[in-house]
């Protein structure tokens, strides 16, 4: 009964906080963290102790797979250079900078233990940055880079962490050996992920039941993670590769109903897991502080400020040269991808909030070395990791929207976006009509059926009319969706009325209601896209 109460209380907290975040005016991850810290000191509130292995081996593969499955692969390709430089180069750079600094600052801290701290705080958590950035009107390319970075930096950081922890536990640390092991485990993860992805693609292409496909989708991250870890490769790299491949191939592998189920399923998983972990991060504060009795307050404050400053400044030191040096050194690259306006690397530099991965990895640190000695200053490493998480989430998370307004980055061209949508709608409608003409050459369906099919295809062309319309005027497509939703509301109400009168059986009611819900969900999705365009346009005007 106690377990049921604790789980219910935690989920209720997450649901209430996420619902209140918009009204309060704070980003959801930031508010979840603040509430978690507050609840930690509330008498009688359950003491949640999520096993670190549960987060690292269950929660993180699920989150990474969900993010990878929905990632736009063409954006990854278009931004492959900056993403690789951030996900791998910046992660290792931060690990080394913070590691050496901690080794110099903290008396008696071995260099390998310093590298452990560096690897813990190296990977930014793009969940918070992207959530805040989208609301603030951050350019799409910055969001794409942050999302791509977050897919691979966790794997890079945790691979570096494994090497550093092994050095602490084993008592030796060699930079050449560390680099070799990092490359080997990453390459192994890529190979395993590619193999698992191809195998699962063949299996899922033959699965026709949407529920069975959803179960396979749930198993996919673990089918990628476990074999990679078993051979000493990076399980997280394997998960990311599998998710990217299967998500990109989903339109070919899955039918429409399976895609709807998978989309909703992963949305719920990601929504719940991220919320729970951010609250638990705050709830662990008392445990982390409890083991620091032997350190003075002045020492903790000075080391904390220095480490946080190193984490923040090292990102600027890496990002700006990474953005401007490659185009400067390569004419070919300069012609294909010229140096960006300074505002873009500035936003990427400031959007370096830490979160789930850092704390979970810190809590999973071993307590002793191979010889049975205590892990060097483990409590201090935990505390500094927590301080970096809180400082970046609150400091950068709360100021990122103001920074976007202040520096006025180049805004996305909404006309280009609308043009792309018009092109997509027209291409889809034309393909449908072409296939209908092919069918009519070999079949002779009733005229009313043909007329209805043509009307459905031409509806896409009607939606395309909104592409070039101005936001202030309600375009035809929006009028269509608004009126169609009102019609669907009336249809649903009549359906319920007939059910309540006992004039419909269950199968007929469920079938027709699902058709109405599917159509309305597509209209709601379209409306959200329009609102994002409108919000971006308003942001553009406020900048001007």
Image (spheres, rainbow, N blue to C red):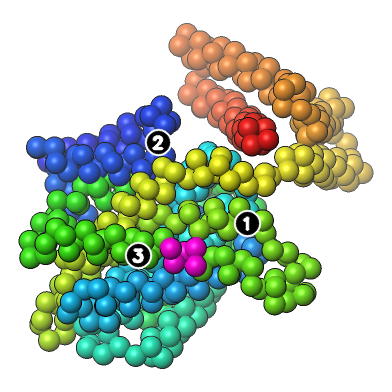
Magenta span includes 254? no
Which residue corresponds to the image point at 31% horizontal and 51% vertical from the top-left?
390
Report helix, strand or loop for mark 3: helix
Give the residue furthest to the left. Answer: 293
- Residue closer to the observer: 394 or 249: 394
Of circles 3 and 1, the one toward us is 1
One can see residue 307 in this view = yes
Range of residues picked out in magenta: 313-317
Magenta stretch mostly in which secondary structure? helix
Which residue corresponds to the image point at 55% horizontal and 42% vertical from the top-left?
406
- Residue closer to the observer: 399 or 299: 299
Comes first in the chain, label 1 or label 2:
2
Determine which of the numbered discs, if any, sits on residue 121 in the image: 3
**Number of numbered labels in the structure image:** 3
Answer left or right for 297 relative to 59: left
Residue identified by numbered label 1:
342
- Residue closer to the observer: 379 or 267: 379
- Residue closer to the observer: 313 or 207: 313
Determine which of the numbered discs, if any, sits on residue 26 in the image: 2
Query: Compared to 144, does 371 lie above or below?
Result: below
One can see residue 357 in this view = no
């Amino acid at each position: 009964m106690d377990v049921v109460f604790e789980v219910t209380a935690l989920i209720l907290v997450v649901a209430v906080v996420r619902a209140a975040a918009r009204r309060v005016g704070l980003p959801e991850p930031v508010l979840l963290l603040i509430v978690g810290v507050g609840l930690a000191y509330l008498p009688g509130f359950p003491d949640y102790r999520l096993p670190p292995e549960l987060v690292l081996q269950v929660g993180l593969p699920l989150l990474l797979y969900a993010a990878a499955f929905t990632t736009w692969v063409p954006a990854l390709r278009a931004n492959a250079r900056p993403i690789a430089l951030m996900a791998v180069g910046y992660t290792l750079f931060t690990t080394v900078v913070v590691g050496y600094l901690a080794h110099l600052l903290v008396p008696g801290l071995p260099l390998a233990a310093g590298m452990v701290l560096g690897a813990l705080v190296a990977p930014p958590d793009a969940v918070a940055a992207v959530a805040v950035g989208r609301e603030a009107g951050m350019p799409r390319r910055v969001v794409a880079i942050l999302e791509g970075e977050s897919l691979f930096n966790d794997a890079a950081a945790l691979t570096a962490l494994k090497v550093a922890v092994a050095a602490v536990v084993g008592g030796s640390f060699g930079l050449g050996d560390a680099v070799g092991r990092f490359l080997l485990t990453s390459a192994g993860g890529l190979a395993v992920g590619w193999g698992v992805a191809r195998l699962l693609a063949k299996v899922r292409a033959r699965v026709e039941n949407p529920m069975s496909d959803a179960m396979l989708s749930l198993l996919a991250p673990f089918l990628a993670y476990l074999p990679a870890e078993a051979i000493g490769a990076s399980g997280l790299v394997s998960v990311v590769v599998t998710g990217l491949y299967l998500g990109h191939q989903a339109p070919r592998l899955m039918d429409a109903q399976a895609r709807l189920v998978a989309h909703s399923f992963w949305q719920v998983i990601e929504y719940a897991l991220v919320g729970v972990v951010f609250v638990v991060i705050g709830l662990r504060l008392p445990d982390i502080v409890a083991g620091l009795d032997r350190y003075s307050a002045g020492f903790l404050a000075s080391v904390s400020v220095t480490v946080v400053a190193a984490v923040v400044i090292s990102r600027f030191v890496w990002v700006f040269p990474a953005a401007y040096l490659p185009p400067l050194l390569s004419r070919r690259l300069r012609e294909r991808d010229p140096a960006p306006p300074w505002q873009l690397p500035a936003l990427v530099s400031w959007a370096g909030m830490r979160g789930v991965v850092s704390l979970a990895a810190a809590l999973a640190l071993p307590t002793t070395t191979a010889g049975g000695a205590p892990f060097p200053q483990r409590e201090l490493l935990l505390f500094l990791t927590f301080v970096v998480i809180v400082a970046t989430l609150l400091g950068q998370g709360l100021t990122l929207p103001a920074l976007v307004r202040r520096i006025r980055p180049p805004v996305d061209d909404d006309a280009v976006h609308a043009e792309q949508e018009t092109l997509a709608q027209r291409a889809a409608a034309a393909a449908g009509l072409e296939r209908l003409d092919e069918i009519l050459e070999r079949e002779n369906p009733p005229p009313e059926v043909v007329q209805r099919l043509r009307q459905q295809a031409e509806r896409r062309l009607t939606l395309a009319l909104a592409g070039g319309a101005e936001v202030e005027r309600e375009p035809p497509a929006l009028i269509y969706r608004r009126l169609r939703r009102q019609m669907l509301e009336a249809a649903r109400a009549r359906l319920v009325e007939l059910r309540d009168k006992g004039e419909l059986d269950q199968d007929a009611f469920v079938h027709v209601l699902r058709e109405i819900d599917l159509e309305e969900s597509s209209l709601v999705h379209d409306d959200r896209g329009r609102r994002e365009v409108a919000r971006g346009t308003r942001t553009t005007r406020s900048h001007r």
